[in-house]
Amino acid sequence: MDPISIHVNGRSVTRASEPRTHLADFLRDELRLTGTHLGCEHGVCGACTVLVDGQPTRSCITFAVACDGREVTTIEGYDDDAAMRLLRQAFTRHHALQCGFCTPGMLATSRDIVLRLPDADEARVRLELSGNLCRCTGYQGIVDAILDVLQQQRDAPDAQFERLRQRLSAPRTAAVTRPDATLPAEPPAPSPARAAASDAAGIADMAEVDPVAMAKAKAKGNAIEVHFDVPHPIDRVWAFMGDLPAVASCLPGATIDSHEGEKVKGTIAIKFGPMSAAFAGAARLERDDAARRAVLRGAGQDSLSKSRTQGDITYRLEALSADSTRVHVDMIYALQGPLAQFSRSGLVKDFVRRMVADFGHQISRRLSGQAGPIDGAPPTMSMAGMMWSVLWNRIRGWFGAKPRS
């Protein structure tokens, strides 16, 4: 174990820490700062939220070693904080807590809202709070408390409060380095052309899928086999499936930025309630014309959460009749990072099956000469309606009813 130094609540602490130790465990077990609560330990509920360099951070999915040399503020460190003083008073006034388990994380997020969004209305406050779960209050008291503090600042601005806002919006500088560290010479800034080439090379590298990761993903059950039928001859379907821009137009949220031979670069955007992600990456298509079989291998990364995904999608065409084709799809996928928590449920497989079925429906429309679902800029793929359909089909299945397609 290597020692790490973190500035916690205004004082510097140095402790030995395992690389796998999360910040929440480090704070609670090593420093006895038990006001940081652990709930889901998947980064979902928000109870563990603390500030790292002034930014709300899920301490249950942040490694302690990643905070070496940085400033961490927990619920115990707000004694002289003007924003937190007003929030605590407002929380008491509006009865914004009951059991109190979510309150430390809720206060950290609320502080970020009142400092960063001075003009926020109720709808925006609720959106910003969507990453913090409370099982007691129904949120109304919490929302009222935040709106109360915002209104106080509009009516009678507090000087210390305003200085916190200015500090939050000021450009951030590099963090503290260790005293014994030797600073390397600063490399020259790359030219725009070189930077663009570097970015292009980075995205191109994403197309190379790690076979070890794929084997682990398959062993964990991250594999899905589905099929859909298209009422068109196999030769026509095969030709269409080789036209990647046309195929992408059948998948809402998918855009292709460049297409050269068997390689393609693009983005797919998804939205699930308040959560959104845009995975930018690259893929390589390998087609076997004789067997009517193809493999699309690719990987991408979400710019916001830094979550990374990679996978293989194999599709094979089977002629059911002269005018009907079945497309068999086998998928193996791996997801790493904060969004990986959303890949653990059995609902995900049902969701993907529904998504593939809709994708096949759009292909049938395109081959029939009907207008595609996308006119101009592609919309973000909204999972809410599709997930509701999946849940409804499961409920129907429990009562013996046939699922709706």
Image (cartoon, rainbow, N blue to C red):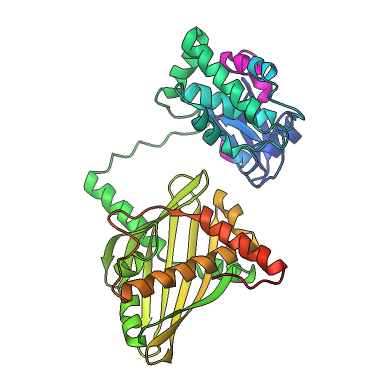
Question: Which of 62/157 is in front?
Answer: 157
In the image, is residue 82 part of the stretch drawn in magenta? yes
* Image quarter (top left, top right, bottom left or bottom right) of the N terminus: top right
Horizontal and vertical percent for residue 97? 71, 26
Say if 252 sits above or below 211 in the image. above
Question: Which of 262/399 is in front?
Answer: 399
Q: Is 249 on the left or on the right of 336, as rendered? A: left
Q: Is 396 on the left or on the right of 278, as rendered? A: right
Say if 166 sits above or below 390 in the image. above
Question: Residue 373, located in which quarter of the rendered image?
Answer: bottom left
Horizontal and vertical percent for residue 242? 32, 76
Q: Residue furthest bottom?
A: 322
Horizontal and vertical percent for residue 362? 39, 69
Question: Is residue 74 visible to the viewer in this orientation of the structure?
Answer: no
The residue sitting at 51% across, 70% down in the picture is: 211
Question: Is residue 380 visible to the viewer in this orientation of the structure?
Answer: yes
Q: Which residues are magenta?
A: 66-88
Question: Residue 280, located in which quarter of the rendered image?
Answer: bottom left
The residue sitting at 74% across, 29% down in the picture is: 100
The residue sitting at 57% across, 70% down in the picture is: 404
In the image, is residue 140 part of the stretch drawn in magenta? no
Q: Is 78 on the left or on the right of 201, as rendered? A: right
Say if 125 sits above or below 262 in the image. above
Horizontal and vertical percent for residue 229? 45, 80
Question: Which of 270/174 is in front?
Answer: 270
* Image quarter (top left, top right, bottom left or bottom right) of the C terminus: bottom right
Number of marks: 0
Question: Residue 7, located in which quarter of the rendered image?
Answer: top right
